[in-house]
Amino acid sequence: MYRWLNGPGAAFRDPLPGSTNYLNAYDPQGNIIRALADPTNDTKGRGEEGELNDANAGLGRNRLEQNIAGPKPIPKEKADDLMPFPLNRQFRSQPVLSEELRDEIFRRIKQEKQSVRSVSATLGVEMQRVGAVFRLKTIENQWIQEGKTLATPYARAVSAMLPKTPFDPKSQTPPLPHESINDLPVHSATTRQLFHPVPESMHFNRASAAKVFSRDLLPADKRIPHPELVELAKVAAQHRGRNDIVRERRNELEQQEAAVLNMRREQKAAQEAAAKKVDTPRWQFRFESIKSESAGKDGRAKEGVGARYGIPPQDRKKGQIKIPTKVE
């Protein structure tokens, strides 16, 4: 074991800066495989006088990975280098968001007041992940203001050993997409196979196919997370400038978001106007018209009375079944 630790295993003693350090990236002798394919890099470990030293080969290659001994940096990891488990060749380590990219997501939402949808489309990060990053960064800044200790060294050490999606705020080129952001979610109504005969003269499109599965099902180009990208591609096919297209789409998104906010304000104002208020010296009582059918069949619908304050569970009631009746 010690012979391996002092020989080929020396490359795994410290994480490689700016690169992963998985077993599949090395051969049994401790050579970096992707560096061996590059003839400009010398992956041999050498002593102070330039003589080949097999015992320090792994250490020399580690120095080369840090771009100290080699004239050029080692190439970026390939798919075969991102396998942390040598016996499981189907698993690939997926990249995580770099700290610069997370800060940029938080800055665009917090300072520039951009929507989650706009940031997702611009940076190539899924909307759920954008929302999660914003919430976590908000908690992180709150903890910093409260003087709480953060596990920053641990986070940096783990991040250094994982592939990351880079982001350069000074670069003028669009950032690399982190993941697919427009995957079509699988609807439960589309999991069955149907044979629907139609006449040859009928114009059958995606909207027609959606209606076959369910009356309330929208077509695929409207159920994707970013339907505006479809319209953007149609406009781009007209050979117009990218800046003009992005500006128009951003204005349209802002108008749509403003319309949604106005609709919510109107709904809230209508609820306030429908409620009867009785002021007393200490309290204000509010009375609203309700329907008994709003509680649903089980009495636990969110529109029912008492949903705001919680409904007691039925597990202590006599005659209630307390064991699972089905497995989902």
Image (cartoon, rainbow, N blue to C red):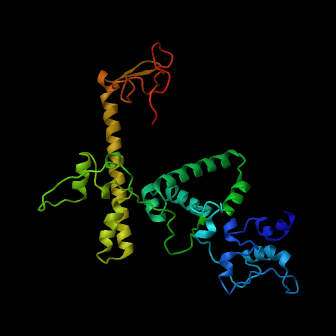
From the viewer's perspective, is residue 119 above or below residue 141? below
Q: Quadrant of residue 87?
A: bottom right
Residue drawn at x 47%, y 25% is 310
Residue drawn at x 68%, y 44% is 146
Q: Quadrant of residue 53?
A: bottom right
Q: Quadrant of residue 246?
A: bottom left
From the viewer's perspective, is residue 270 above or below residue 110? above
Drawn side of residue 131 relative to residue 86, left or right:
left
Residue drawn at x 76%, y 79% is 68
Q: How many marks?
A: 0
Q: Nearer the viewer, residue 198 or 135?
A: 198
The image shows residue 118 at horizontal and vertical percentages of 43, 60
Is residue 240 something that shows in the picture?
A: yes
Drawn side of residue 130 relative to residue 215, left or right:
right
Q: Nearer the viewer, residue 3 or 13?
A: 3
Q: Nearer the viewer, residue 39 or 169?
A: 39
Residue drawn at x 74%, y 80% is 43
Drawn side of residue 80 relative to residue 210, left or right:
right
From the viewer's perspective, is residue 281 above or below residue 220? above
Which quadrant, please, contains the N terminus? bottom right
From the viewer's perspective, is residue 316 above or below residue 308? above
The image shows residue 17 at horizontal and vertical percentages of 71, 69
The image shows residue 192 at horizontal and vertical percentages of 31, 48
Is residue 20 something that shows in the picture?
A: no
